[in-house]
Image (cartoon, rainbow, N blue to C red):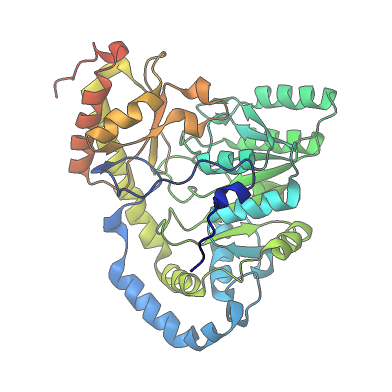
Amino acid sequence: MSTVSFDPRSLFRTGLPDPAPVWQGMAEFTFNAGHNAPELIPLEDLVDAAQSAIRREGRSLAIYNQGHGPQGNENLRRFVSQKLATRGITADIDDILITSGSGPALDLVSDLLLTPGDTVLVEAFSYAGALRKLRGRQANIVGIPLDEEGIRIDALETILEKLAQRGVTPKFIYTIPTVQNPTGAILGLARRRQLLALAARYRTLIVEDECYADIVWPGDETPPALYALSPEQVIHVSSFSKTLAPAVRVAYISAAPAILRQLASLKSDGGTGALDQIIIAEYFSNHFDAHLSRLRATLARKLAVLTSAVQEELGDSVRLWLPKGGIFLWLALPEGIDTRTLVAPAAAVGVAFNPGPDWAVDGDAAQNWLRLCFALESEEQIRTGIARLAGVLRQHPLLADARKVSA
């Protein structure tokens, strides 16, 4: 046994994030991250789908990518083609690349487009995972102001013009136009067309993240995907993690052939897990519409329970940004409160939530915001967990006068 002792951390590259802590398990009341509803996992139907798919395709697991090539299982890509059609997109299986989750999909896009110092435009409130990835690549991230409908086109035009005057062309605009994360806003059709026109005028691409587009409340209009409106200037990313299950790490990209071929050349993981692909294809090919109906109805009910509980516990001391779909509620506490300081006290009473600064280009500008995921917990757990969280919040001097509203 070697007796030579040295600290291997001296060999680590610079610029790494803090080491991951040892996993301590989930909180009693888990309102953080993007978990989904356990009761909606279709156990028996997934068992049946797995048996059917493995009996039919199991022998091909001996071959990398089942012999279907690096773009993924053909049956899954065929289903994705049909699914994209519901978003107004025309794409055959050769126009689709399967990836191991939306995170790796975004990594591929960044591998294709970014070098350190490049500029990327991102909604002022946005997906924390995307922000972390862009910061890790030393991108210059410029936030785009939002309102209840999503990107403010007037603000975006001003930003693009100022950058152009400095000779800067953004590599891309990263947007979540359909059920935005964390706000739940849906960008209207007129603004989508204006966004595309601005991107064309200033010669930049759009990366469209539609991971939540399947989860829209009845009655809320969902315009066609940006990719459907202008496929030459949009890279479309979506996922099955929110539609089926976060632990199923399967997503997909659709883009113009010149872009997709190059993205495929950068995929170096030996292929996305084939078992996940064939089971998803088998299940959703037979149950997609019914599954979505159950998912939307259950999540809409849970959102109603959550908003009622928050308003009952904290009254008008909080401002809710009511989502038009998805699994998150984005809400603001009074200015002067930094939600990062409330994470530990909340954890001490068994409650986990996402502080707003993690989900913003400018963290300090979002310090009084927080995000609550309402999908995982039962309706009873939501009510009890929010009561506990409210007890913590009322300890803050700026919320000391917040009164529980009588039911």
Rendered position, 307 above or below 114: above
Residue at position x 64%, y 37% in the image: 192
Where residue 170 appears, as percent x and y from the top left, is 75, 36
Where residue 364 appears, as percent x and y from the top left, is 51, 21
Residue at position x 77%, y 22% in the image: 162
Rendered position, 53 above or below 305: below
Residue 167, quarter of picture:
top right
Q: Nearer the viewer, residue 270 or 280?
A: 270
Task: Tell me: 137 left or right of 1.
Answer: right
Residue at position x 36%, y 61% in the image: 290
Which quarter of the rendering shows the C terminus?
Answer: top left
Residue at position x 48%, y 28% in the image: 357
Where residue 161 appears, as percent x and y from the top left, is 78, 24
Task: Tell me: 274 left or right of 122.
Answer: left
Residue 225 visible, this angle = no
Residue 279 visible, this angle = yes
* Residue placed furthest toward the left: 406
